[in-house]
Amino acid sequence: MLTKTIEFKSKDGRKVKILEVPVMKEDSPLYLRVNLRLNQFITRIVNHKGPKTIFSFREHLKRTTKWSEYEEIYQSEELKNNA
């Protein structure tokens, strides 16, 4: 599973990092769900008034989704011949 990091500045000028955002193909059935949850998470972060500037999207999904859905999103592909 490939993940990416998103960095941006909030309205009040603080630099925010969101770690472990899954990279998904647009034709994946989970693409829309992950995008919606990411948009909700970013909105929540922008409205957050604390000193914290680094957030984990993976940890957020662990707390807010069903475990089966979380495993679908972050499933790791089996490597063949230990490659």
Image (spheres, helix red, strand yellow):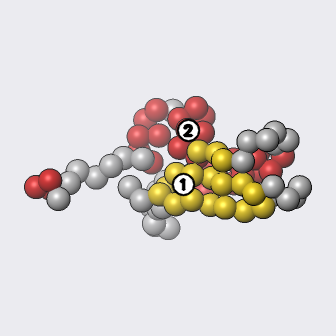
Specify whether 48 is left or right of 42: right
In the picture, the disc for residue 58 is none
- Say if mark 2 contacts mark 1, CB within 8 Å: no
Q: CA distance from mark 2 to mark 1?
A: 10 Å
Name the residue located 33 percent from the left edge and 49 percent from the top edge: 76
Of helix, strand and loop, which one carries label 2? helix
Name the residue located 10 percent from the left edge and 55 percent from the top edge: 81
Density class for disc 2 (Cα within 10 Å; few <14, some 14-19, many ≥20) is few
Q: Which residue is mark 2?
A: 59
- 10 lies above or below 74: below
Quarter of the picture containing the C terminus is: bottom left
Residue 27 picture location, percent across and down: 46, 66
Residue at the extreme right of the image, as rendered: 12
Of helix, strand and loop, which one carries label 1? strand
Judging depth in this view, the residue of 57 and 72 nearest the camera is 57
For badge 2, the amino acid type reads Glu
Mark toward the start of the polypeptide (2 vs 1): 1
Name the residue located 58 percent from the left edge and 46 percent from the top edge: 57
Residue at the extreme bottom of the image, as rendered: 26
- The answer to whether residue 32 of the structure is visible from this angle is no
How many numbered tags mark residues here? 2
Density class for disc 1 (Cα within 10 Å; few <14, some 14-19, many ≥20) is some
- 79 lies above or below 27: above
In the picture, the disc for residue 21 is 1
Residue 78 picture location, percent across and down: 23, 50
- The answer to whether residue 77 of the structure is visible from this angle is yes
Judging depth in this view, the residue of 82 and 62 nearest the camera is 82
Specify whether 71 is left or right of 54: left
Residue 71 picture location, percent across and down: 41, 40
- 58 lies above or below 63: below
For badge 1, the amino acid type reads Val
